[in-house]
Amino acid sequence: MNDQINRRAFLTRSALAAAAFSVTQKNLFAAPAIHAAENLKTVAELDPAEVRRFTGLLRGRALMPDDQGYEAACRLWTGRMPKRPGLVVRCADVEDIATTVKFARDRQLLLAVRGGGHTRNATCDGGILVNLSGMRAIDVDPKKRTVRAQAGSTVGAVDETTAAHKLATVLGECPSVGISGLTLGGGLGRLMGQHGSLCDNLLSARVVTADGSVLRASSEENRELFWAVRGGGGNFGIASEFEFRLHPAGRVLSGMLRYRISDAKEVLRFLRGFMETAPDELDALVEIGSRILQYAPDAQSPIVVINVCCGGDLGKAEKTLRPLRTFLRPTSDTIRPMPYLEAQGLGDVSTLIRHLSPGFSGYGQSGFLAQFDDEAIDRIIAHCERPPSEAWSFALDHYMHGAVLRPSENNLAFSLRRRGYSYRSSAFEPGETQAEAPTAWVRSLNGALAPLSGGRMYMNYLTDQGEAGVRAAFGANYDRLSELKKKFDPINLFRLNPNIAPAG
Ligand SMILES: Cc1cc2nc3c(=O)[nH]c(=O)nc-3n(C[C@H](O)[C@H](O)[C@H](O)COP(=O)(O)OP(=O)(O)OC[C@H]3O[C@@H](n4cnc5c(N)ncnc54)[C@H](O)[C@@H]3O)c2cc1C
């Protein structure tokens, strides 16, 4: 494994994000409510000698609540520590994962798994937390155009390592997101119009199942498991390593277009038609709002910003983007040719993270817009015209088009093969207890858009939608996933995720 490259990549991109994460996450980007963990024991209830015997088998570090490093190992991406596991295992390798799975299963302990820690499922109270941040090796095979990444790797580290070979796989734009959660839930990113979702590009995974077996899942081995982990989340086991297909990633035409908030309706209406005929090479994300925008963190009053990235031939990309750049004069246009890696780094979540700190209260939710028409635009604009506070945003992420739509819905567990936008809305107020107006606004906007979802949802964007959200995410694949859950995890050991109940 290429440790040196990995370490450098981690220190440059991800450390910046990690350093800023000493803040509160509140209920933003949390996963839905989980099945109650009745009849499960806590680590504190076990005989300490038995716990010591177990930790003595590990090659990685076991951290009890009083140990130095325990709190750092429990923190989520925001730096917040909402729960206190009874024991944290910082796994060194796949054997550590298997040993921990067997111990948790045999002692009936609640088990949480932390990849990049971007959801509140990556921790638990009293049980065992498997922390994968010590497993971050990344190894590129430029000839075969593949990359192997251990399960604790981040998006930023994988992007940097593959970019050194002018190659990339389909990753999102937030460098601190874990490769694990992203892959297992689907994985939407700028290249998906050309190359499908991240899980479409997964060639193999090593998975520890609930009985402690270490299985390689690929198109040749354990095919059912391979189908299930490509979109079924962490329901089927703990992945220790992934292997992805890589694609050439040279220069792209990318940057931001800003518009006045008074132009929001016209911008969305134009974009609707523009994206319907967009080539596979084009990705466009939209944010409306102020103070917490990822693509305009300096905006102190409401604006509209479109972030575009167009790959392929740059001359063709210029032509593709010309109508968008000229239909209405933007207040600024930063689009220019740049390396793909630079385009991946144009976002900045620092102002969002600041608003997730203890000095603020807020709320966020997400959904899917299968119907992006005048009615949808009117509902969005009606809410944007009366925001609840100074810090708010409505974002249309990842327009589903091109290669990501080509497989059938049951080709993989990931079944969101539908034209449309995933969206996120959030709002904040200063103060610890002021979440009423932001919450009402976000809920009202999501309520207005819910009938336009086509009954679907992106699993990795689930917040607090409960079982209905989980079923909307898995769609017609739910029953097959439930049968496979019964086969690979009949006791629902892996329950801290958008949970699929074992059949029967
Ligand atoms: C700021 C931000 C930006 C985002 N941008 C994008 C984007 O561009 N595209 C996109 O598709 N999504 C995006 N997401 C959503 C993101 O994909 C999910 O939140 C994803 O689950 C995060 O993965 P993680 O490993 O960081 O999180 P974690 O909370 O560590 O893990 C998520 C879930 O997977 C389980 N899990 C983690 N590792 C493993 C493992 N190795 N084996 C089994 N189960 C495991 C966890 O227990 C948990 O249930 C974004 C989220 C945030 C907060």
Image: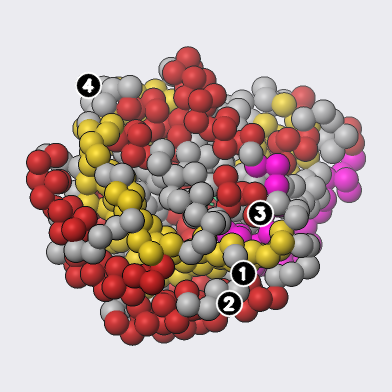
Q: Which residue is mark 3?
A: 356
Which element carries disc 2, helix, strand or loop?
A: helix
Q: Which residue is mark 2?
A: 441
Q: Which residue is mark 4?
A: 143
Within-10-Å neighbours for mark 2: few <14, some 14–19, many 20+:
many
- Residue 449 placed where, x, y %? 43, 79
Above-or-below relation of 137 to 266 = above
Q: Is mark 3 within 8 Å of ligand 1?
A: no
Determine which quarter of the picture holds residue 70: top right
Question: Are the residues tagged 1 and 4 within 8 Å (C-beta)?
Answer: no
**Disc 2 versus disc 1: distance between alpha carbons?**
9 Å
Out of 280 and 498, give the one closest to the viewer.
280
Q: Amino acid at mark 4?
A: Lys
Which callout, 1 or 4, points at the residue further toward the start of the chain?
Answer: 4
Q: Which residue is mark 1?
A: 389
Q: Which residues are magenta?
A: 21-47
Which callout, 1 or 3, points at the residue further toward the start of the chain?
Answer: 3
